Image (cartoon, helix red, strand yellow):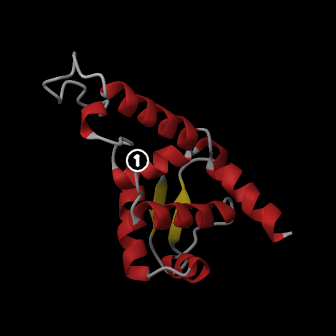
Amino acid sequence: MKFSTKARYGLRAMIEIALHYNQGPISVKNIAEHQDLSEAYLEQLMAFLTKSGLAKSIRGVQGGYLLTRDPSNIKVGEIIRALEGPLIPVECVNREDPLFCARYNECVSRVVWERVRNVMEEALDSLTLQDLKEELLAKQQ
């Protein structure tokens, strides 16, 4: 499975916001400059992240974006789901519609896709923005 640019750039934006946690809002312009991203595309991504409740938009001259929770309480999986939708390798293992496939009860290959989904969810949900923030700060030393 390959994640889209939306997921990769959105995660980078959230890490940048986490780096400025408790320092007031950070503007899209600053996020874009620090992460080498397009401001226009970043605005679109931030709309998804705001709608999902992970980020908050502050209007005005000193405006920008804030995290809605402490970085230690925001899982990477939440961010990816907000931007990509369910973390599923194939549609038949979508937790939101488990009976999507007519072969649900007799499909043996489904076991493979369920395991892939579970490993992916476990990996992404085991990391928080705080973990990534600390990793980045350690690399910068």
What is the residue that sits farthest to the front in this orientation?
A: 108
Q: Residues within 10 Å of mark 1 (few under 14, many from 20)?
A: some
The one nearer the camera, 83 or 5, is 5
Which residue is rendered at x = 44% and y = 36% of the image? 116
Is disc 1 placed on a helix, strand or loop? helix
Which residue is rendered at x = 47% and y = 58% of the image? 56
* Residue 111 percent coordinates (x, y): 37, 25
Image: 61 above or below 48: below
Quarter containing the C terminus: bottom right
Residue 129 lies left or right of residue 141; in this view the side is: left
- Which quarter of the picture shows residue 92? top left
Residue 68 lies left or right of residue 46; in this view the side is: right
Q: How many marks?
A: 1
Q: In this rendering, does residue 53 appear at all?
A: no
Question: Mark 1 belongs to which amino acid?
Answer: Arg
* Residue 137 percent coordinates (x, y): 78, 64
The one nearer the camera, 39 or 93, is 93
The one nearer the camera, 28 or 3, is 3
What is the residue that sits farthest to the left in this orientation?
A: 102
The one nearer the camera, 109 or 70, is 109
- Which quarter of the picture shows residue 122? top right
- Which quarter of the picture shows residue 135? bottom right
* Residue 83 percent coordinates (x, y): 38, 55
Q: In this rendering, does residue 102 appear at all?
A: yes
Which residue is rendered at x = 52% and y = 60% of the image? 11
What is the residue that sits farthest to the top in this orientation?
A: 105
* Residue 2 percent coordinates (x, y): 41, 56
Residue 90 lies left or right of residue 66; in this view the side is: left
Image: 29 above or below 54: below
Which residue is rendered at x = 47% and y = 76% of the image? 60
- Which residue was labeled with disc 1? 81
